[in-house]
Amino acid sequence: GKVSGELIRALPNLKLIHSNGAGFNFIDTKTAAERGIPVCNCAGMNGEAVAEQTLLLMLGVLITVHEAGHFFAARLCGIEVQEFAMGMGPALISKTNKKGTKFSLRLLPIGGFCQFYGEDEDTKDGQGFNDYPVWKRAVTVASGPAMNFVLAILIIVIYLSAWGLPTVVPRVA
């Protein structure tokens, strides 16, 4: 069918106000204001910018949780962590705590790392990463991906608790 000129003129003013899982409800900003419905007019923000920022935020959370898994497992196993870094490249901000671990935020938001004492070289004091028993090293290495699974399960539980499973309820007329 044909779309009326009035609808075409109204399209730029339509804003998504609710998604109920089965479809989307749209309302024009004038009607929303009349009804007292808050509508986010993100001036200067296009969909691509929002998507990029959301992606960076999600990757940041995912990487932080992953690296925290390595970090806390190493601490529990007695392995010295020299640096806990978010991002790659030159450090923008860094701070060293009482235990000598350097925490840093780096320029490129494309990953992160935990640097363990003696990870890349042999140490003579017997305290390097490679001097610890295999099981401690395995727990430390496996804890990063394990934390990603824990995060995924947590997100699913929160989502299902908040919105539930979409269901179709049969109705007899």
Image (tube, rainbow, N blue to C red):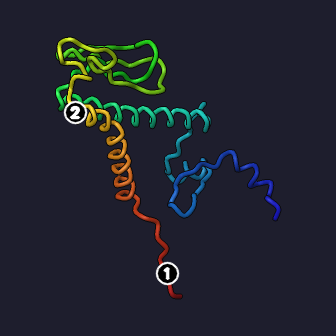
Disc tally is: 2
Q: What residue appears at the point 60 percent right and 55 percent down from the top-left corner?
A: 26
Asked if 51 appears above or below 129 in the picture, the reply is: below
Question: Residue 17 vs residue 139: left or right?
Answer: right
| Residue that label 2 marks | 136
Mark 1 nearby-residue class (10 Å; few <14, some 14–19, many ≥20): few
Instruction: Quarter of the image for the N terminus: give it.
Output: bottom right
Considering every residue shown, the one lying at the far bottom of the view is 173
- Say above or below: 5 vs 119: below
Amino acid carrying mark 2 in the image: Lys
Q: CA distance from mark 2 to mark 1?
A: 55 Å
Residue 19 to residue 136: above or below: below
Q: Is residue 81 left or right of residue 169?
A: left
Where is residue 83, by image quadrant? Answer: top left
Tell me which amino acid carries mark 1.
Answer: Pro
Q: Position of residue 16 (x, y in %)?
A: 57, 50
Which of the pair 172/83 is nearer the observer?
A: 83
Question: Label 2's element?
Answer: helix
What residue appears at the point 40 percent right and 13 percent down from the top-left corner? 91
**Quick check: 85 above or below 21?**
above
Reading the image, the residue beneath label 1 is 170
Instruction: Give the residue at x 60% y 54%.
Output: 27
Q: Nearest to the eye among marks 2 and 1: give it.
A: 2
Query: Residue at image x 44%, y 27%?
Result: 111
Residue 102: percent from left, percent from top? 28, 16
Q: Observer-nearest residue: 72 or 96?
A: 72
Mark nearer the N terminus (2 vs 1):
2
